[in-house]
Image (cartoon, grey):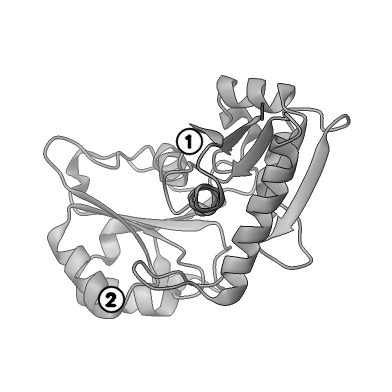
Amino acid sequence: MSGTLYIIGTGPGDPQLLTLKAVNIFASCPVIIAPHGARNGSSTALAIVSEAVSLADKTVVELHFPMKKIRSGHEPAPEILAAWRHAAEQALYYLDQDQNVCFPTLGDPAIYSTGYYLYETICGIRDDVAVEFVPGVAAMSSCSAALATPICLGDEMVAVIPATFSDDRLRSVLEHFDTIVLMKVHRVMDRIVELLKNADLMDHAVLVEKAGTAGERTCAELDKLSEAPHYYSTIIVRKNPSTVRTLIN
């Protein structure tokens, strides 16, 4: 007999955006394994959970997941593979003791999430592990709510991509889609602004920083930002704004 691994989306930051199912599972689960990006940092996903559920009687294991680029179809860096393997072994240790384990991940597990790498690694070790995914509110949904702007309507096409894509790929997406959600923009703002200018889309782009938190901020003048935005920032480029009422703080 073994426990169940729950990979749970915590939403973008506001603990009130945790689903009821997520809260109930976190409350009943004895073990939480939480990822953090900075080697000596803390887990943002765990911090969100801690505001909704008491962690006093739980076993909490925080693990470092290196923040390095992962390219589809390419072997990840050895240190990334080692981190995934270590997390999988930690989860299996508690699961084999018939304890359920929760793995919180920001936003929704289906969108650029560490959770699926853990899932694939565990499946590569053992194929008999019970795993359940619990969806969460995606960051782009929270950004849309902050702007009172839809992601898509009618027959509009949407692309959700990392802003770290090559210029050619970004140009192609900007040309062919009606709405473009650019994630991971904090380190490439200068390049993104230039691409948006060349595509004549600056007036269609809005940045949302720390969506769903007390520090939430929006900006519609991307070329006037005085400093790089926070890591948790997203740009929504919507080509069809005529039906949109945008709220800018």
- Identify the residue at horizontal 58%, vertical 45% (top origin): 105
Q: Which residue is mark 1?
A: 137
**Quarter residue 234 falls in:** bottom left
Give the side of residue 217 with respect to residue 164, left or right.
right
Q: Is residue 53 above or below residue 45?
A: above
Which residue type does callout 1 highlight? Val
- Identify the residue at horizontal 66%, vertical 36% (top origin): 102
- Identify the residue at horizontal 15%, vertical 44% (top origin): 156
* Residue 196 in sight: yes
Q: Which residue is mark 2?
A: 195
Q: Is residue 236 above or below residue 102?
A: below
Residue 46 x/y as whole percent? 71, 43
Q: Is residue 112 above or below residue 163?
A: above
Q: CA distance from mark 2 to mark 1?
A: 29 Å
**Quarter residue 169 falls in:** bottom left
Which residue type does callout 2 highlight? Leu
Instruction: Give 179 or 68, whichever is nearer the viewer.
Output: 68
Residue at the right extreme?
56
Instruction: Give 19 or 155, whichever is nearer the viewer.
Output: 19
**Quadrant showing the N terminus:** top right
Q: Secondary structure at mark 2?
A: helix
